[in-house]
């Protein structure tokens, strides 16, 4: 019996079949296009029930489990999560370095599920820029900083004079114009990463993807690198999605997305408020994310504090939903508590987070 249940859940996960009791609304009937049109027309990154399954020695590893994501044009967004949570898998798919198993993923209008192999090179060359954590993967050691920045433009067929002019402009933009004639070995790690940002922006991509760009830098260099990304976002309007473990980086963006067990779990939104005295203050609010199937992940510390496991009781109130562990009796109210219907996490069971095995790169 358990084998059949597991097979059914995987089939539903990968095919988009409606789970028992799941409501179909107008946004899910028309597929990816209608959902994006209904929810976020300005999204430059749109993932709809995205799935990535790896198979190793007959064992299936579900790195992404029906992930939904919208990132609008011009956003500077941080993506955080524990090792193995699926964030690097997501970044590789968006970069065109990996292919999703099922679902939909679109970047700047390009469908990454159906994209042909011959089209991926052009996509990576002109639609997205990518910044690796290791500086050695971003620069050619035998080229100067200016030559490194000019290389993507050369491959795209841009004339020499325009390549040279834009390379110098980009190096000035990220604050390392003085490094134009230096070889990578003559630059610090922070300078190399800022040059790498220039390389990633050379062909005017719609999206810049960065995988732990400050992970190997000291705090001062990290601030300079992230400052360069903020400048590029503000002056060029490029959308930036950065994977990071650095709380100083995630605290400097307006939106921080947390991924857990292959799905978006929470988001932190930051805004500036002004009080009656005219004093400005930054306010951060964390939200749990409700996906299209009605699932949300209860924060781990909530689960541990209330000792939730297996099942929870739900009660619909006039302005909120109450949640209680199944060992507790909810307060007497006009509403009637009801058991979870199998749509929270996996099977609607609290405390079972089904960790995705794998390496720090989210792949076996």
Image: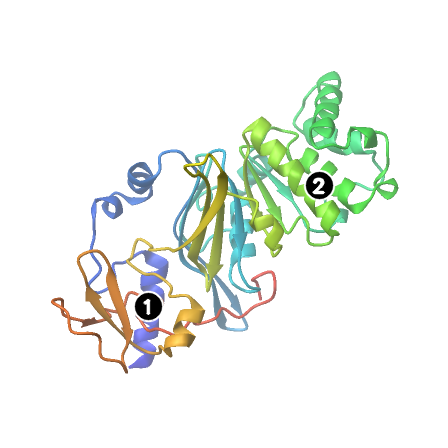
Query: Looking at the picture, how far across and down is residue 334, in whole percent?
Result: 11, 67
Crowd class of label 2 (few under 14; some 14 to 19; many from 20; radius 10 Å): some
Q: Residue at x 72, y 38 (%)?
A: 194
Q: Residue furthest right?
A: 186
The quadrant in which residue 252 appears is top right
Which sits in the foreground, 252 or 354?
252
Q: Residue furthest front?
A: 277
Horizontal side of residue 115 vs 164, given as left or right: left
Query: What kind of element bears circle 1?
Result: helix
**203 shown above or below 26:** above
Can residue 14 be spotted in the picture?
A: yes
Give whichever of discs 2 and 1 has the lower sequence position.
1
Q: Estimate the x, y position of residue 181 in percent, counting from the top left.
A: 85, 30
Residue 7 picture quarter: bottom left
Badge 2 element: helix
Residue at 57% x, 33% y: name it.
233
Query: Eyeballing the image, is 329 above or below 191?
Result: below
Q: Nearer the viewer, residue 146 or 340?
A: 340
Which residue matches tag 1?
A: 9
State which quarter of the image contains the N terminus: bottom left
In what quadrant of the picture does the C terminus appear? bottom right
Image spot of residue 348 (x, y percent): 30, 70
Q: Which residue is mark 2?
A: 224
62 displayed left or right of 324:
right
Q: Is residue 221 above or below residue 237?
A: below
- Residue located at (74% from left, 45% from top): 221
Q: Tell me: 87 left or right of 111.
A: right
Q: Residues within 10 Å of mark 1 (few under 14, many from 20)?
A: some
């Amino acid at each position: 019996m358990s084998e059949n249940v597991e097979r059914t859940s995987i089939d539903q996960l990968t095919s988009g079949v409606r789970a028992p009791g799941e409501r179909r609304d107008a946004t899910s009937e028309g597929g990816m296009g209608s959902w994006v049109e209904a929810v976020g027309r300005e999204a430059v990154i749109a993932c709809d029930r995205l799935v990535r399954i790896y198979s190793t020695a007959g064992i299936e590893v579900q790195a992404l489990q029906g992930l939904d994501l919208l990132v609008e044009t011009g956003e500077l967004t941080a993506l955080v999560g524990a090792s193995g949570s699926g964030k690097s898998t997501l970044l590789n798919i968006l970069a065109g370095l990996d292919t999703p198993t099922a679902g939909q993923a679109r970047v700047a209008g390009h469908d990454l599920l159906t994209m042909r192999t011959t089209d991926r090179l052009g996509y990576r060359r002109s639609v997205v820029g990518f910044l690796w954590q290791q500086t050695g993967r971003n620069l050619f050691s035998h080229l100067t900083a200016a030559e490194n920045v000019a290389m993507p433009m050369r491959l795209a067929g841009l004339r020499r004079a325009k390549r040279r002019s834009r390379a110098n402009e980009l190096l000035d933009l990220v604050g390392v114009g003085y490094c134009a004639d230096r070889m990578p070995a003559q630059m610090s790690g922070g300078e190399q990463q800022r040059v790498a940002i220039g390389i990633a922006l050379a062909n005017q991509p719609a999206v810049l993807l960065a995988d732990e760009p400050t992970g190997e830098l000291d705090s001062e260099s990290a601030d300079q690198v992230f400052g360069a990304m903020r400048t590029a976002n503000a002056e060029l309007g490029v959308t930036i999605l950065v994977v990071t473990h650095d709380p100083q980086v995630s605290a400097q963006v307006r939106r921080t997305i947390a991924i857990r067990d292959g799905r978006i779990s929470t988001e932190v939104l930051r805004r500036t408020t002004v009080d009656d005295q005219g004093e400005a203050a930054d306010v951060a609010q964390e939200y749990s994310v409700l996906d299209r199937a009605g699932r949300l992940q209860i924060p781990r510390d909530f689960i541990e504090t209330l000792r939730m496991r297996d099942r929870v009781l739900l009660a619909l109130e006039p302005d909120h939903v109450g949640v209680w562990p199944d060992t507790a009796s909810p307060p007497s109210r006009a509403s009637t508590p009801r058991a979870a219907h199998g749509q929270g996490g996996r099977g609607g069971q609290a405390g079972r987070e089904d960790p995705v095995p794998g390496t720090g790169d989210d792949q076996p």
